[in-house]
Amino acid sequence: MRVLVTGGAGYIGSHMVKRLLQSNIDVTILDDMSAGVVNEQHSAFLIRGRTDDVLLLKKIFTMARYDAVIHFAGSTSVSESVVSPEKYFYNNFTASLALLNTAVECGVKKFIFSSTAAIFGSPIYIPINESHPSSPINAYGESKLMLEWALKRFEVAHGVRWVSLRYFNAAGADPQGELGEQHEPETHLIPLALRATYSADQNLTIYGTDYDTPDGTCIRDYVHVCDLCEAHILSLDHLIRGGSSQSYNLGNGEGYSVLDIIRTVENVTGQLAHVKYGPRRPGDPSRLVADSSKIREELGWKPLYDLDAIISHAWAWECRGI
Ligand code: UFG
């Protein structure tokens, strides 16, 4: 089997490539390296390029027969999407549509898409299942939801079969310590909280303490990057065996506040985090917790890692650079 992994040099994509290679699946990575890191340790073929480069895509799809596309490439910061919506609509929708369209034209009709909890906006109930209305409150969520709509239409018109995986908060790192989160600049809570324990000049700002939550800080559902990868493996297997198109919410089903994360970071590292309090960050909903029973029941997904393991693996990765 051969798959094209867009964004395969990025945070989640690189873990996915490692996992696919462990299953002896041939992998080609398409990554523009805007946020990616070259991994010398694995045998995947890396092509530097963008998903809107239709000529390049046609070459890729005609040089070998691909069974599926796993599409990670995109822009991922909620706060950036508030100030630069054009970047999000272009990268996450327009460029993704070019990829989808070219894949279909070249006969590649199985598509696994990295979607997000941000498509739900501010939830009207928790935990959030797949029947929850989609009402994004930022361009990031809107741009991802637009591709979900395109997938549905492409199925009817062109016979594409797809799985859309709505990640809640992806976190953690490869338990073997080969891969981890490396965003530039880093905006995610767990790596920033870890850095705030050992670097005196890296304070963590807590964005908002007046949310309608027990301690006033935002609640999120943190899910280990390797558990997300297992969900992709199950989804690929499902599509290859002729399974129907599906959307699945992916989280551990447990909500943790920003202060819970800081406490766990302090326990794992044995050091206090330097924190300060700031205003709310625009675009942040107060609570996001997943109901993932659909993928557990239909595909047998079982996340292995709890919050302690997520933060311990992220800490081990962070320590490599200290
Ligand atoms: N936070 C802080 N200080 C920081 C960084 C984050 O208080 O320096 C808070 C945020 O306000 C939020 C929580 O920590 O309440 C988590 O923030 P992250 O930036 O780590 O993650 P997000 O929840 O913003 O984003 C994640 C994914 C997105 C996904 C989104 C769903 O990165 O891809 O969840 O809203 F879409």
Image (cartoon, rainbow, N blue to C red):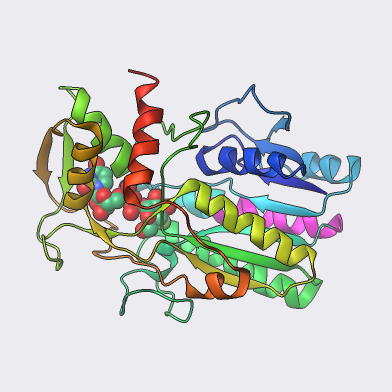
- In the image, 111: left or right of 55? left
Which corner quadrant of the image does residue 152 belong to?
bottom right
Give the x, y percent position of residue 208.
14, 53
Give the x, y percent position of residue 75.
49, 46
**Of residues 71 and 223, the one drawn nearer to the viewer in this rendering:** 223
**Of residues 286 and 305, the one drawn nearer to the viewer in this rendering:** 305
Q: Is residue 321 above or below residue 157?
A: above
Q: Quadrant of the image for the C terminus? A: top left
Give the x, y percent position of residue 25.
77, 44
Which corner quadrant of the image does residue 286 belong to?
bottom left
Query: Total number of numbered labels?
Result: 0
- In the image, 62: left or right of 115? right
Q: Is residue 98 magenta?
A: yes
Q: Residue furthest top?
A: 322
Which corner quadrant of the image does residue 68 belong to?
bottom right
Q: Residue at x 63, y 53 (%)?
A: 96
Q: Is residue 282 above or below residue 285?
A: above
Answer whether residue 79 is visible to the viewer in this image.
no
Q: Residue at x 11, y 60 (%)?
A: 216
- In the image, 180: left or right of 41? left
Magenta highlight range: 92-107
Give the x, y percent position of residue 227.
51, 52
Q: Residue at x 71, y 31 (%)?
A: 46
Q: Residue at x 44, y 31 (%)?
A: 182
Question: Is the magenta region chiefly helix, strand or loop?
Answer: helix
Answer whether residue 120 is visible to the viewer in this image.
yes
Q: Is residue 86 magenta?
A: no
